[in-house]
Amino acid sequence: MFIEQLVNGLTLGSSYALIALGYTMVYGIIQLINFAHGEIYMFGAFAGLLLVSLFGVNIFIAMLGAMAFCMVLGMLVERVAYRPLRGKSSRLSALISAIGVSIFLSTLMALIRGTNTTRYPEIIEIHTYHLWGLDLSSLQIIILVVSALLMVGLQLMIQRTRLGKAMRACSQDLDAASLMGINSNRIISYTFAIGSALAAAGGVMVGIYYNAVWPYMGTMAGLKAFSAAVLGGIGSIPGAMIGGLTLGVLEILGVAYLSSSYKDAIAFGILILVLIVRPQGIMGQKITKKV
Amino acid sequence: MDAVLSQYIDAYYLHLMVLIGINIILVLGLNIITGVTGQLSMGHAGFMSIGAYTAAIMSVHLAFPFWASLLAGAAAAAAFGFLLGLPTLRLEGDYLAMVTIGFAEIVRVFFLNFEPGGKAVGLSGIPEHTGFTLVWIMVLLIIVLNAKLLNSRIGRSFYAIRENQIAAEAAGINTTRLKVLAFMVGAGLAGLGGGLYAHYMTYIAPQDFAFMKSIEFLNMVVLGGMGSIPGAILGTIVLTLAPEMLRIVAEYRLLFYGALLVLLMIFRPNGLLGDIRWYDVKKRWFNKGVKTWES
């Protein structure tokens, strides 16, 4: 029972982690809470739904298509709503702009599809495996494996490639990176693209797992993922992964053993408690401020 | 007074003006926390709901007089501002924002499961005590008190904390105490606004105080111009009226609202009224011809 809940928690948590990565990467570079990120995740879920119901593609093709679509969408949002503000305004103005984009995108989807939930067509047969005495559905295995692959891939990209090196340089010091010949606007654009693609993959998987997508699904998922990113220490990529998984597991365990009507409160309660004890998050570094 | 007004002014406009008044009280509260002291709070609706529920429950279940419930609501919200402010002031910027979001969500979920508050159905049958006259007298009173506060030693310390906390500390300002104070005052005003709202609408439910409500208040503060009282008032008026004006475009309303926020931020990145304070305006009006370094 406990182990099964743990697996459920990890499944939910890996979707939080995928979304949280987008928050934390963008935050690491331009210190912006990208409030439209939850809506990108929602668009990813709908793009996957469209591909599945129109072309009958399998889950992996749907995921790739949704990721490509959201890459473009994420870069477009950055270009239209954030870049004009960069450098000449406070961070709060960019935050309000992000909120504007978030309202715009969720309303747009509500106008296109209506506010009701849509069910995902059954695109994979769900088998249940009995492994070491616990029940695992094939869907859970796919979600866990795909999320793990994406996270490992991201980590390799950040640590091993030139693009990753440029991204790390930008997150340390944007101005210095520009002086070293890095096209910082392009790197920021790529960061949005990568973060959005991860959120889209999460969106498709959550859509299939819970068998429901609706235009406002991004709000609560975005809030939870943001709190996962903060829990792990915002700006830290391993932190977002750990924060997401921790939050997912604790939320599922809280629902299972405490009370389901306080589901949303549990996640935030844990977050507040952790931050009071450890203000910089689990993996965040304590920055000593100098005058 | 209200009866006289309702003969000359359309009920709909009167309703909008009452809503604007209530929102101004709430936004002036958030302005002290976020605009003036620079502590990003994204859970203002949480404080509002504490005030609204406390006042409403006292009026409905305990038959307290209106004034007593209103003050109790404000006091309860201020107490929670204190409780939230105290442990979280070690946190900075976006960590604090996250805690305030979390706090507001916890409050909402609590009221969703709170028996005396009617759970998810909400609390109805609250006696109607709030009208145009009362709200606007309170608005004027609060504007005056707010301007006095911001011009005092405490108010200037608030601004100093926003500009540079380390420098403020070095200048002998007890930043912890003042930040908690800012949180208490802001939350208290939110509670007062919540109590007025409850006794105006006569019905409240947890979804009235959801995350988007907090975001609306934050939009008003930032849009008007951080830390400026005239700015907060203008931002509130614009953003309370915008959804009403946009009714012509019917279901595309929120689409335009979202786009409007983005455009306003692109073209007025520091808010409509930047950082204008009464003090500066007066100075400019009475010292015409004198060029300061700002102009």
Image (cartoon, rainbow, N blue to C red):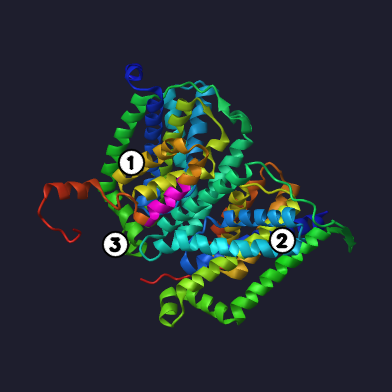
The local secondary structure at tag 2 comes to helix
- The amino acid on which the numbered mark 3 sits, given as a three-letter code, is Ala
Residue at numbered disc 3: B171
Residue at numbered disc 2: A62
> Residue B144: image x %, image y %?
27, 38
Image quadrant occupied by the C terminus of chain B:
bottom left
Q: Which mark is residue B274?
A: none
- The amino acid on which the numbered mark 1 sits, given as a three-letter code, is Ile
The magenta stretch spans residue B260: yes
Q: Which residues are magenta?
A: B257-266
Residue closest to the eye, B202 or B67: B202
Residue at numbered disc 1: B233
> Residue A105: image x %, image y %?
54, 51
Q: Nearer the viewer, mark 2 or mark 3?
A: 2
Q: Nearer the viewer, mark 2 or mark 1?
A: 2
Instruction: Look at the picture and state if A234 lies above or below A53.
Output: below
Mark 2 and mark 3: Cα distance apart in space: 59 Å
